[in-house]
């Protein structure tokens, strides 16, 4: 039995016992990985081909080693401009040993339980009551800060301050009269220009 799988933008024809180099897979050496993007699986005369979605099959492989591809030199230049640039590149690869090619997908891992969402009606009711609750809280806060009637009573019943004596009033009036108001300076006028004498021409 063989299969054609897709990984990292490449397609590989694999069978049990084969070794392939694929793009780096971030797992430890010796661990087992499952490749489920199978495009075709063949077993003698029977062949299943993917039509719109991958075939229900899985390929189990073991990570043998992590390797690096051969170094590639990338040289670019622009003629007559003294422009030269050399770059190097080495791809990160993982070597896999195919253990089994089987029909049917591998069992999916159980997802962690998530918290149930609140009912839509409950959420709508809470959002509708939010302005009313906020207004009630504001009224309570204002009531707590306002002074009580008992606290304001002594202040209202307090006697008015005694009037100033006649002598003090007269002194303040005289001080107000003695201080003359500051006069604004008159605006300066420009002197007229002298007229030029013009000849009669006689």
Image (spheres, grey):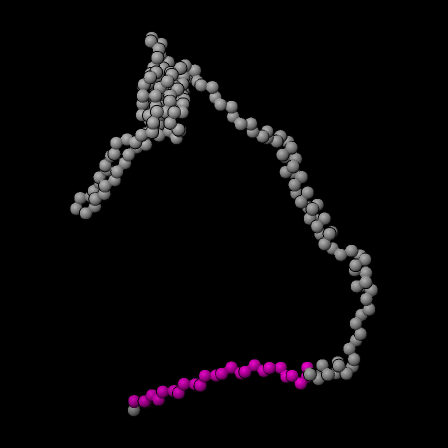
Q: Magenta span has 198? A: yes
Place of residue 147 in the rendered image (x, y in percent of width and height, measured from the top left): 76, 56
User: Whole-percent x and y of residue 133?
Assistant: 68, 42
Q: Is residue 138 visible?
A: yes
Task: Farthest residue to the top: give it.
Answer: 45
Q: Residue, x 75% and y 83% (percent of image)? A: 170
Residue 107 or 185: which is nearer the viewer?
A: 107
| 106 vs 168: above or below | above
Point 74% across, 51% down: residue: 143
45 shown above or below 75: above
Give the image quarter of residue 178: bottom right
Above or below, 37 against 91 in this view is: above
Of residues 6 and 17, which is closer to you in this image? 17
- Provide the residue span drawn in magenta: 176-201
Residue farthest front in this picture: 30
Quarter of the picture containing the N terminus is: top left
Secondary structure mainly formed by the magenta segment: loop
């Amino acid at each position: 039995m063989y299969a054609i799988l897709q990984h990292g933008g490449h397609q590989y024809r694999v069978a049990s016992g084969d070794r392939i180099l694929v793009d780096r897979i971030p797992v430890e050496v010796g661990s087992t990985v499952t490749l489920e993007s199978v495009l075709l699986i063949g077993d003698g005369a029977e062949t299943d081909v993917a039509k719109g979605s991958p075939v229900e099959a899985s390929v189990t492989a073991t990570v043998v080693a992590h390797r690096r591809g051969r170094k590639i030199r990338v040289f670019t230049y622009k003629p007559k401009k003294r422009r030269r640039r050399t770059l190097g590149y080495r791809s990160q690869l993982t070597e896999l040993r195919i253990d089994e090619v089987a029909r049917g997908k591998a069992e999916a891992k159980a997802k962690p339980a998530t918290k149930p969402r609140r009912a839509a009606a409950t959420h709508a009711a809470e959002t509708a009551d939010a302005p009313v609750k906020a207004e009630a809280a504001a009224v309570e806060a204002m009531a707590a800060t306002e002074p009580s009637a008992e606290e304001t009573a002594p202040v209202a019943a307090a006697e008015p301050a005694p009037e100033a004596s006649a002598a003090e009033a007269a002194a303040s009036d005289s001080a107000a009269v003695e201080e003359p108001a500051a006069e604004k300076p008159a605006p300066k006028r420009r002197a007229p220009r002298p007229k030029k004498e013009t000849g009669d021409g006689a």
